[in-house]
Every structure is written in C-alpha cells, then in structure tokens.
Image (cartoon, grey):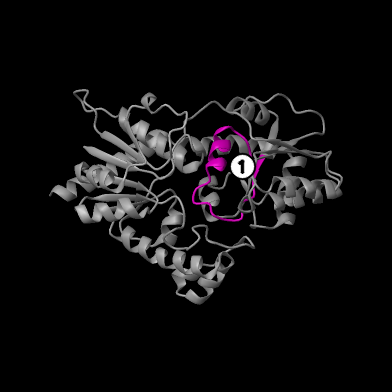
Amino acid sequence: MKLLLYSHFFPPSIGGVETIVLSIARGLAELRESNGAPQFEITLVTQTPAGNYHDSANPFRTIRQPGLLNLWRLVRTADVVHVAGPAFAPLLLSLLAGKPFVVEHHGFHTICPNGQLLIEPAGVPCPGHFMAGRQTECLRCNSSQGWIATYRLWLLTFVRRFLSAQAAANISPTQWLGDLLLLPRTVSVPHGLEAGEAISRPAPLPNTPVIAFLGRLVTTKGVRVLLEAARILRDQNRLFELLIIGDGPERRSLEQFVHDAQMDAQVCFVGRLSGPQVEASLARASAVVVPSLGGEVFGLVVAENMLRGLPIVASDLGAFVEVLGGVGLVFRTGDAEGLASGLARLLVDPSLATRLGNGGRERALHFCSKSRMIEAHARVYRDVYATAIS
C-alpha cells in the first residue's frame, strides 16, 4: 500500500507532533508481509526544512517543502493519505482527487479557533464556546489578536471541521479528545513510546527531595502556578529543590518571580538539556510536575515520565487524567494551593511516591505501547483502503 504521511512539522523541528509522526513512519516501515515484502511504501511530506537532519537515515522517503503541483501529484499516486492535524492543502487535494484520507488530531483546531481550547491571553480553560454555538463569546476569546486575525481563525475552524468530517477516519490520541471533537468515524489510538528502562535513582539526599518540571517555558505550561505552589511549600518550611528543565519566552519573567519571592535557594533553572543530561537530572528527581493550563490532547511528558517510573503530579486536564489512569496525583487546573497540597503528600510520604512511580510505569507500558500504536494505525489504513476499493 502506498501511504502518504503529511506533517507540517517534522525533525529537525522539536515537539510532540514531530516525535509521534517520526515514530509512526519508522514503525510502519518495519512492518513486513509473510514473504518479507514491506506492508507500506511510505512517503513523508513536510514543510519543515532539513537543516542538518539526515533524511537518508530513515527507512522511508522524505519530501520537504513541495510546491502545490508536486503535492497534488503525490496525493494522486497515494493509496491512502494520513494528515497530522487538519492541514488545508493535503486535505483539500485528497478530497478533490477522491483519495481516502485519515486525519490524526494533535490539537483542538476543529473545535477552537486558537487550537488550544484556552481563553487568551489570560490562559483560562475555554468552556467550549465554538462547539456550543456561542460564537460571539468565541470571537471575544481571541480578540487580543486583532479582529481581522480573529475572524480569519474563526472562519477557518469551520473549514477544518468540514474537511475532517469528510475523512475516512479521524484518529484521536485520547478518548477524551474524541468525545470533544464529535467527528464521524473517530477512533482512539494512544501515542506509543519506546519502553526504556525505569530510572535507577540513587538514594535521595536527606531532607532534599527534588521536584522536576520539563517543558517549554510558555504561559500554557503553567510554570507560574508551579512556582506559586513552591512558594507555599517554602512558607510551610518544607525542604525541597525545584528543578526547571527547559527554555522559552517566559523564562526571564519566571526567574524574576523566583528572585522577588526570595526562592533562589529552592528553584534552579537549568535551561534546555540534551537527552543524556535530562536522564541524569531526572535520576535525582522524586517527582515530576505537569501543571499545564490547557492545549494538551495527550501529554507526552506525562507518559514519558511514567515510563521512567517517576510519580506524576498533574493538572486535571482530561487528557492527563486519561493517560494517568488513576496512578498519579491530580489537582484542579491553575490551583497553586491544590498543587502544593499534592506535592506535600509526596514530600511527607516517600512510600506513596514509590507506589505511584511503580504503578505509573506499569500503566504506561500497556497504555503507551509503541507496537500497539503502530498496529492500530496499520489497521486503520487497511480498513480505509479496503473500503475505498470495494
């Protein structure tokens, strides 16, 4: 089967979409028929320039930044088209060419104009104005971008929704997201990860547990909420170290918040780290906090650290709750006191942290199985193609 995978973002760009699309493409390329022939002939199309990335190292063909005519040719020669996110060009061309196409949803772009399901710039979770038909409130949510941009995004949401409704299948990484999208022919396929070894952590230093955060330092990741919770813990005379791994536009203001709160002794910003450096830092961690305010359809950082055997404290976003499956602590999104309370439980009860870490790893090994993700995608493509030619 000739499979065209389209992802606007792809390595060397870094992000959750890039990680999952690369994993899917590599996994599908490894599938073989009983006679040894590949089950899928894969062409990956992206708008991301190659930079120093070596496409030849992958077991599939990669075409970068094709023109519209070239993309049309690629669509016409494919048996099935997979689009990572409701991108207009490949969806419209697939529809015009009469090719079966699959949309994998990595955001809220078919139900929210800003794709985050957040009221910006306040960072407050949106109650779903667009889908509830409250279009005046929906427009007001995004008015900070200017009315021309606001109306454009609002109108494009209708187009994305229409195109996705024509898809032969819509793939959602969580059932929670699928229930929000309300699109026809939706199937839930959790993101899959490599089952690495659980972190072997040295015995913690006396009275100095390490709490870690990993992610971009942007408003939606909720780092300010984490810092406010840290201030509460400090005022309770609890001893801890907060390790902030990552970088982003909010770093300067967050560092200023720490300085003004006189928490320089408790909080350490280490910036963006390489893979081995991340593992070395997390080997010291007692827990990982994921305090996102919104915009999360799965939560790779949650799943990755569950696989590491680290206990998770996360905001109660629907995707996080589903991935955790009851083997982590959750707090009300944006509630610094609730987060501080959850962290305090772990600080005073190391056995709870151990139970959550072990349970989380077992949950992730099953729920986030890479082989399960690859086979589920392959099954969707086979079913879609069989229906198309019948």
* Left or right placement of residue 153 versus residue 162 in this view: right
The verdict on residue 305 being magenta is: yes
Image: magenta residue range: 288-312
Q: Nearer the viewer, residue 144 or 263?
A: 144
- Expressed as whole percent of the image width and height from the top left, the position of residue 222 reads 65, 52
| Amino acid tagged 1 | Gly
The verdict on residue 74 being magenta is: no
Label 1: how many Cα within 10 Å (few below 14, some 14–19, many 20+): some
Callout 1: SS = loop
Residue occupying image coordinates x 65% and y 46%: 217
Quarter of the image where the N terminus is located: top left
Q: Against 183, is 255 above or below?
A: above
- Expressed as whole percent of the image width and height from the top left, the position of residue 43 reads 29, 36
* Left or right placement of residue 7 versus residue 305 in this view: left
- Expressed as whole percent of the image width and height from the top left, the position of residue 320 reads 55, 49
Residue behind mark 1: 215
